[in-house]
Image (cartoon, grey):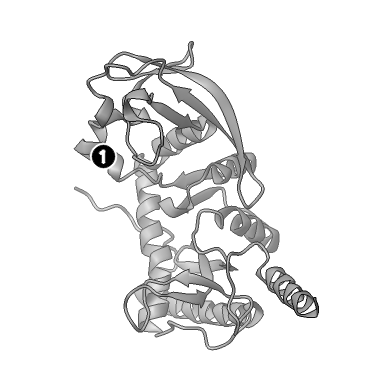
Amino acid sequence: MESYISKLKEYTKKLYICGERNSYSKTDHDATFMRLKEDAMLNGQLKPAYNLQHGVDAQYITWLDLSSRPNDVLTLVPFLKDMEMNLGFKYTEIVADAGYESEEAYVFMEKNGQDSYLKPQNYEISKSRKYKQDISRRENMTYDVQEDCYICAQGRRLPALYDRRSKNRNGYVSVVTIYECEDCTGCPYKEKCIHGNHCKTPMEERNKRLNVSKVMKEKRQETLERITTEYGTQLRMNRSIQAEGSFAVIKEDLGFRQYLYRGKENVLAQSVLVAIAYNISKLHFKIQGGRTGQFLTDLKGA
């Protein structure tokens, strides 16, 4: 019993250190194991790391944050809240890559009076011919607003069955509507329309299902219209130049690829010092090139 109690205390301590994360490093309890693009073996090993986020304006790093989450999708809203609280003002236009897109981010920015210029996750693939000809996708079906149902390529109806609620790790609750075809029996497009072999129900007994978040669908369409304008295209181009460029300069020009200290407080301090060095260097080159008043790079003509 004493050995069991000792083990229970050990596990309880480890779970407390881990918190909401799935892992932590024994040598740095604040670090989380992430699959990195670069490592000594060049095979994407899991290593203790921090997810560093840069907020860039006019090529200067105006805010940064360290996240314990390995992906970016849940980091945008906490980043915006933290930046607004500490800077004393908020940006009215937020530009981010597809990795940050989420329903939570869309809803937060709308309530916060900010215009989202988030690149949809399906933006690039949606332009391909294969995507446009895929009859299994919701985007290629006809939607009946009055009946609240989708109509497939065979002309069969997929009415709404019920709503399902789910909560993410930030506490945001999303509502997903489940649509299902009334009867897919004898459909010649069934094998092209219904994918996945993980379902235990035989193919001949299965009907086409769609999981649709109406809020996400609406906000993504609004953002898509916004980012495809000339101004939206310019913002997205500048995001690639400025945000990605800040990491490129720090890693390649400054040679900073690995933190020298452990603990989130020390790592954050080192990140701030590197950002200050980057901003001073950027100011110097802007003065030399006479570009101190330039905020955005112009789009090149066709």
Q: Measured from the top left, where is residue 302 in percent x and y?
A: 19, 47
Q: Position of residue 266 (x, y in %)?
A: 63, 83
Residue 97 visible somewhere in the drawing:
no
195 or 145, nearer to the observer: 195
Count of picture labels: 1
- Judged from this view, the residue extending furthest toward the top is 146
The residue under the point 53% across, 28% down is 177
> Farthest residue toward the front?
1
Residue 193 quadrant: top left
Residue positioned 58% across, 27% down in the render? 163
Q: Give the vertical position of 178 relative to 59 (above or below).
A: above
Q: Identify which residue, 81 or 216, lies in the foreground.
A: 216
Instruction: Name the residue tied to disc 1.
Output: 127
Task: Estimate how packed mark 1 is, as few (under 14), some (14 to 19) or many (20 or more) residues with alpha carbons within 10 Å.
Answer: few
Q: Which of the image's four quarters has the N terminus?
A: bottom right
Task: Kindly identify the amino acid type of the residue bearing the numbered disc 1.
Answer: Lys
| Residue drawn at x 45%, y 47% as measured from the top left | 118
Between 81 and 27, the residue placed more toward the observer is 27
**Residue 188 in the image, given as x and y percentages of width and height:** 22, 20
Q: Residue 242: in sight, yes or no?
A: yes
Relative horizontal placement of residue 98, taking residue 190 as reference (left or right): right
**Above or below 238: residue 173:** above
- Pinpoint residue 39: horizontal percent, then vertical percent: 37, 80
Q: Is residue 236 left or right of residue 53?
A: left
> Is disc 1 placed on a helix, strand or loop?
helix
